Image (cartoon, rainbow, N blue to C red):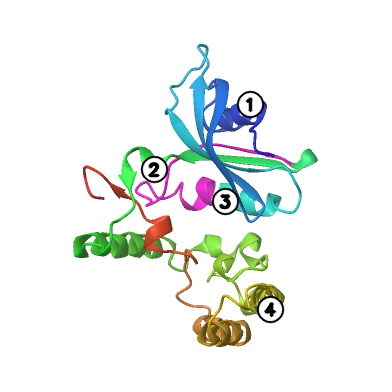
């Protein structure tokens, strides 16, 4: 499914700002990431809308049960974790919608490409310092936070980049077990593309990262939120004018 349901868009917009309506939605770019639709979309505000809309947004949605938990989790992150941080280093949320009866979910966020660029290479030292400062603010906000004990953080995810540091030891063990088979299948599928070193590294990861994670969190102190897949080329944007 590459098209985006206008009714779903309007439901998402209304959840964020009641009275907001769109008359049309146009997909500019679209791709599927691990079974979930991601698109840059242009949304036209309806004349009756009570709020203005940015010219473009990023939409992430699913219409099947397999990937509903992932989109639902991202929605919860924006509505709880990021909502408590006024200066959160993340795109603004423009709307969300979850329809359990048909496994549909949609998250609308700020299109950072409108005013931001990815850092050029080599990354300037002051940019690296701001990135470290932003990560430190997130850790300071969630350091041993009460929300980290909620049940949703104890749901095993079969990918290491989805592993929350806040998880108790038994969840870390469940995650470690869950990713062994996907890593094994990856090694088979890409056997000719990987170097001997890369194969050994992935095999070592599959066997040992769970133990390392449990050691890090065994005393259940200093828990926090981590990104899991932070990298300069894909997840970091710098404002063109302010450099922030």
- CB under 8 Å between discs 2 and 4: no
Of badges 1 and 3, nearer the viewer stands 1
Q: In the image, which residues are magenta? A: 77-99
Q: Which mark is residue 155?
A: none
Q: Residue 132 at x, y = what percent? A: 30, 65
**Among the two numbered marks 2 and 4 on one chain, the one whose residue lies closer to the N terminus:** 2
Percent coordinates x, y for residue 49 in the rendering: 51, 17
Give how far apart the Cα atoms at labels 2 and 3 are: 17 Å
Q: Distance between the residues labelled 2 and 4?
A: 36 Å
Q: Between tags 2 and 3, which lies in front?
A: 2
Q: Residue 6 carries which label?
A: 1
Residue that carries the numbered disc 2 in the rendered image: 112
Please tell me whether residue 21 is drawn above or below residue 193 in the rendered image: above
The mark found on residue 184 in the picture is 4
Left or right relative to 221: residue 122: left
Task: Tell me where residue 106 sits by quadrant.
Answer: top right
Q: Do the residues labelled 1 and 4 touch (CB within 8 Å)?
A: no
> Alpha-carbon neighbours of circle 2 within 10 Å: few (<14), some, or many (≥20)?
some
Q: Can residue 133 be seen in this view?
A: yes
């Amino acid at each position: 499914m590459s098209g985006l349901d206008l009714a779903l868009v309007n439901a998402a917009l209304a959840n964020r700002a009641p009275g907001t309506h769109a008359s049309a939605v146009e997909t500019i770019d679209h791709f599927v990431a691990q079974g979930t639709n991601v698109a840059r979309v242009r949304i036209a505000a309806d004349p009756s809308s009570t709020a203005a809309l940015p010219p473009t947004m990023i939409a992430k949605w699913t219409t099947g049960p397999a990937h509903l938990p992932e989109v639902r989790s991202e929605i919860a992150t924006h509505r709880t974790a990021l909502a408590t941080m006024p200066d959160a280093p993340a795109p603004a949320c423009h709307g969300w919608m979850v329809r359990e009866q048909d496994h549909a979910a949609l998250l609308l966020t700020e299109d950072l490409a409108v005013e931001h660029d990815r850092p050029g290479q080599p990354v300037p030292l002051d940019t690296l310092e701001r990135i470290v400062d932003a990560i430190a603010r997130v850790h300071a906000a969630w350091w041993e936070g009460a929300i980290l004990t909620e049940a949703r953080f104890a749901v095993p995810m079969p990918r290491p980049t989805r592993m929350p540091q806040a998880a108790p030891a038994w969840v870390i063990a469940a995650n470690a077990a869950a990713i062994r088979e996907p890593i094994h299948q990856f090694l088979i599928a890409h056997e000719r593309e990987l170097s001997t070193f890369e194969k050994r590294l992935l095999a070592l990861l599959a066997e040992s990262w769970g133990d390392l994670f449990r050691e890090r969190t065994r005393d259940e102190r200093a828990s926090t939120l981590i990104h899991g897949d932070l990298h300069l080329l894909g997840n970091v944007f710098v404002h063109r004018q302010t450099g922030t």
